[in-house]
Every structure is written in C-alpha cells, then in structure tokens.
Amino acid sequence: MSTAFGQSTVLGYPRIGTNRELKRAVEAYWAGTVDAGELERTAAGLRAEVWRTLRDARLDAIPSNTFSYYDHVLDTAVAVGAVPDRFARLGLSELDTYFAMARGVDAEPALELTKWFDTNYHYLVPEIGPDTAFVADPAKALREYGEARELGITTRPVLVGPATFLLLAKGDDPFARLDDLVEAYAGILTALADAGVAWVQLDEPAYVADRAPAEIDALRRAYTRLGGTEHRPRIFVATYFGELGEALPALLDTPVEAIGVDLVAGRGNLDRLAAAGPLRGRTIVAGLVDGRNIWRTDLRAAAAAGAAVAGLADHVAVATSCSLLHVPVDLSVETRLDPHLYERLAFARQKVDEVVLLGRAVRDGTGHLPAPPRPAPAAWRHDDVRARLAALGPADRRRGDHADRAARQQERLGLPELPTTTIGSFPQTVELRRARAAHRAGTLDEAGYTRRMRAEVEHVIRLQERLGLDVLVHGEPERNDMVQYFGEQLDGFAATEHGWVQSYGSRCVRPPIIYGDVARKAPMTVAWSTYAQSLTSRPVKGMLTGPVTILAWSFVRADQPLADTADQVALALRDECHDLEAAGIRVIQVDEPALRETLPLRGADQRTYLDWAVAAFRLATSGVADDTQIHTHLCYSEFGEVITAIDALDADVTSIEASRSKMEVLDDLAAVGYRRGVGPGVWDIHSPRVPSHAEVVEALRRAVAAVPARRVWVNPDCGLKTRGYPEVEASLRHLVAAAAEVRGN
C-alpha cells in the first residue's frame, strides 16, 4: 500500500455529469419511470467517467466518495448513523429513506436546507440529539473505492470531517456528542484501512470561520483521537473557503499526516504556515487553483506561492482551493463564447490541467508554464455607466419615512390583513421548456413564442384569481433562471450553453459570466408585467433579481471590486424599476436570496460587505415613489448574522424562508426592532408534499404570535418553478383558506 500523497490533486469534482445525466436519472426515479437498479447503473457510469477523466489528465491523487445522489453532508450523516428516528421508522428502503430525508414525504417534512458556507450550494442540516445512535456505516465509501479499483484507479475516500459535521448540525448542543461521533469515524477509518485505503480526506471548512476556543479544542481532540487509531489510512484534513486562523496550530498538534489550505480565498494561510515553523513529517496540500470561479489561473503567480510553501514543508502537493463542485464541467463543449472571453476561462476539466501543470512547476520549475491572458478589450468598458455612478449622492440610496410610505401604499393597494401572495415563479412545465428551446433554436418565431408565453401568463393570473390570492405574479414562464434571464439582456454578461452547476439535489443552474462593465440595453421585464396587469384589477408584482444575488449566482469578473460591479448592476435595476412604475406596476419585488450566502466567513470582513450590499440594493430600489411598494425575498440561509442588514435594506415587505426552521427567523427580526412587512414562508416548496390546512394555520398562528398581524404576509418559502400544478393548486388553496381562518380570528 503506497503512502505517498502525490504531487497534484483536486478536493472534489462535479458529480452531475457533462449533460446533467444525474439530474435526469434521479428525477426519473422520483417519477417512477426507472427503478433503483437503473438509477445506480447511471450513477456508476458517471463515477467511472470522472475517475477516468482525472486519471487520463495525469492527476496523481484522485478523490472518491464525492459522488452523491443529493448532498454530501446527508451522505456523511448516513455514514455515521445520524438518521433521525422519524425517517428510520418509515419502513422504506435505504435509498427511499435517504430521499425522504432530502425531500420529505407525506408523513414527515424534510431535513432543513441551507447554504453551504458562502456558496450557492445547499446542504441538508443533520439533526443531532442525545439519542442519536452514531454507528460506522462505511458501505458507500467502500463501494466507490472498490469500483475505482476495478478500473485500476486508486482513490482517496472523502467525508465531511467530524468537527464541521457537528458545527453544521441542528441540535441543542451537538458538540456534547463529539466523542461518540469520533468513535464512529474511527470505525470508518478502520474499515477503509482493511480494504487497502492508503489515504482518507476529511473536510473541515467550518474552521476558516471565526471559532470559539472550545470549538478549536474540539477539532484538536477529534484528530488526536482519529490520529491515534491503531489501524487506519493516513489522514488528509482539507480546509477551504478562507484562512484557517487558530485552527492551523491546533491541527499541527495532532498526528494527521496532511493538511490542506486555501491559498486563493485565504492568502494569509501562507503567512500562518511560515509562522508555524518547519513542518517536518507533514504534507501541505496547497490550494492554488480557484475551485469557485471560472477564470484561468495566473500559473506563474500560483507557482510562486507553491514554491513558498515548498520551502516550509517536507512535501507539498498542489490542489484546487476547494471542490470543483462549484464550477461547470468542461469548457471545451462551449462553442459560442467570444474568443477573447474563452481564452480567459477554465472550467473543472481545465482546472485539473492547471493543477497538474502547477504540480510539475513546484517540482521542476516554471519554464513550461504558459503566459497569462492578454489585457481585456476596451470594448468591455462603459464610460457612461461609470460617469453616472460617480455622480451619485446619498439621496440616491434613500426613500421616504417607512410609516408614511406604508400609509400611502395601503391607500393605493387596499389590501386586507394577512395579504396572500406567492414569491414569483409558477411551475415550469415540459411544454414551456420546449417552447423556450424551440425559440432559441429558431424553430418557433417571435410571434409564436410571445403567444405561447402570454397564454401561460393568462393561465397563471386566472388561477390566482380563482384561488383568491391578493397580490398576483405573472409566473415568469419566459425565464429560464432568475439570474441568467437578466444576464442575457445586460451588456457585460455572457451566457454558456452547457455551464451547469449543482445548486441542491437535482436542481442545477447555469450561472452567467460577468466579464465587463454592466449596462442595461432596454427594458427587460416591463412588457410581461404590464401584460399580466392588463388581465386583472388586482396588483401584479414586477419581478426583478437584486444586485447581490445576480453577483452571487454569476461568475464575476476579478479585475475590479465586487462593490463596483454590484453598483453597475444596481443602476440597471434602478432604471428597470423606474420603467415598471411608469407603466403602472404598483408592487415591485427585488429578490435578494443570496444576501446571507455571500457574507464573508470572518466577522472582521463582514461589515464592509454588508455596507456595499445594502447600498447596492438601495440604489436599485430608491428611485420609485413612496406609494410604490418594494418587496424583497430571502431564502434558505441562517439569517441571524444579517438581520440588521435585512432591516437596513428598507424594503416595505420582506418574504423569507421559515417553514423548515419553524419560524425561528421571526425572533431575530423582533430582536432588532424590525417594523416593516414580513412574509415568513408557510409552505416548504422544496419538498413534494402538500402542507395540510392545519399545518399552514399552525405556522400562521406562530407568525402572528411573534409579529402583529397587520404586518404579516402569507406566502410560500420560495418560487414554484420546480413544483407541479396539482400540488401548487392544492397547497395554495390551503394557504388562502388558512389566511382567511386566522384573519377571521
């Protein structure tokens, strides 16, 4: 059994397949059109394809157990026996129990879903209690290791590390169970060693955030115990998304053989390694290639950082800064990108090549490395946008007093107490997707496309009227994605054909690329919103995506501060809000679901981010009159850290995910004296289950117990594009009836 780590590695690789084969297979299984055997055959083929790709690229150290049907945190929960009793007792197969935890079933709601650190990936939150019976279940890791061995490929199994697992978990005091959990991990390590595994990777990204001394000590205790396991593979502790801080000396106090540091998002890690002194007997895995963005690496600068690390440790391996889960699979399939842009990009497959080149450079020198790309073309710059932004003053980011605004809006809108609405999108049916695809391909002309989309808008408006909703939406049938749709209509953006990235489960997104100055060419949403409003006397919301979310869910240029790009996007949205208002739209929603996910992980960096994020939102929304109601929407995050920023957005109404978290966010809002409208989600739309009338009533009663009913709105957690019409109609019927019942009492 070889104990050498190797010269080059990646921390993970996209698992969805080049053409989203996993998405289609999983959804077919959920629909009952394929069985578990067929699903597993597709999955096995995807895993083999990844391993062969990495081997053929001459990567020295290849990871396994990074594949997942839904979420790698959920996979780790299963591997340590953390399956809540409420799912274990359902009597389902192992696979269906797994999907029940992810999606819920009629009898049980799903595990809570939230953002993976400061990314757009979502993970399922483990539930840990005093009765959780941790037990080692290495079956998945062993199976995938064995599959790779049959191909002649030796791999390194990957799991979420025990300390991060507990920090991500939900429970009164998850760390009270640390010793029990670590014993389960020790059992997994022994089973892997028995199978011939030489190295295992345990991910501890939670330790690049601010951590209390007790949490640092828990990390030290965990790896001291695991390092002392008599029969085990060598341990590689991978950290990423930032600087390790005091966790680095804690890990160096333990017997682990390799430590991974992110030198892209955590440039200070190099100084910390130097301060630690000679790292004898250690492998340092240097994250030199950005695993989260799609720009080519400056290989010569990265090689210099690698050489600096090589002077500190006995052995250095080059790696990606984090898993490549966060970038598209392969640039080579993109045939329509501008050549000036294409030459600046690297997707997962190309980043593997960069890692291999850097591994050679650290060992043999930099003579073989290519030069960096040429300077950006002058045409990517918009001097008129820059001049408008330079002329802005504080008044351009400020509206009138909220109490006065609220009175004027109520006079104009005439809404009842507990007004009902939805978040924006309605089901994206197969027929709608086919129509959009035909329009892109040129087989459906503009007039035919407009007729098809207008027919869907009218269907959505009539359905909402029939169900009795108070504030309507047009359903967004014309939109493929809430960010990509705007990116395709703004200068400075480029769209890919195949640049899919997993967001959660089978949900994939195709983030646009912001490569230059952003400018609005023409109104983007006005025609659809005004058509919808012409069909009804009830208010119809204009629907926009906010500047922070557009940045967070795009691949953003790296040659200017994020704040500057955010303001450019905000200026385009400000003009769109003005045009919507001028066209008679009385309610405009500017969604910012990514406000929390982009929050820096270190407290010292958060104020600067929140200042520019709030300023950008207010620039986008402060150009309308006081009687125009501004909504925003936030979803699937831990909101406590950004509550003051939510208040500072100064939106008239904020709708927010709350169903899986049982309205916990309302306590946070009350604590900061939030006095505006709030719509805590009463229906978890990421689960296929239809909430009962009683469940929605209970959620609403919980809401009005925390917030005066005159400020509460009634809405789902998020948009409805991933759901089907039967469940949408049933759920909205319950929502409207529950609002009437609580309103009547």
Image (cartoon, rainbow, N blue to C red):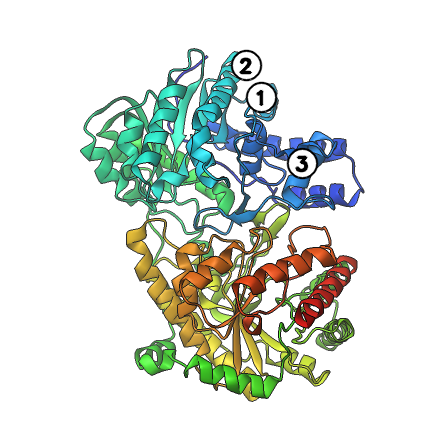
In which quadrant is the C terminus drawn? bottom right
* Residue 90 shown left or right of residue 290 in the figure: right
Residue 596 at what x, y percent from top left? Answer: 44, 57
**What's the amino acid at mark 1?**
Leu
- Tell me whether the residue at label 1 lies in contact with that at label 2, contact meaning CB atoms closer than 8 angstroms: yes
- Tell me whether the residue at label 3 lies in contact with that at label 2, contact meaning CB atoms closer than 8 angstroms: no
Front residue (pair 67, 634): 634
Residue 374 at what x, y percent from top left? Answer: 34, 57
Residue on which the image places disc 2: 195
Q: Quadrant of residue 85?
A: top right
Q: Quadrant of residue 398?
A: bottom left
Marker disc for residue 87: 3
Q: Residues within 10 Å of mark 3 (few under 14, many from 20)?
A: many
Marker disc for residue 142: 1
Q: Please tell me whether mark 2 sits on a helix, a strand or a loop.
A: loop
- Spatial CA distance of label 1 from label 2 is 7 Å
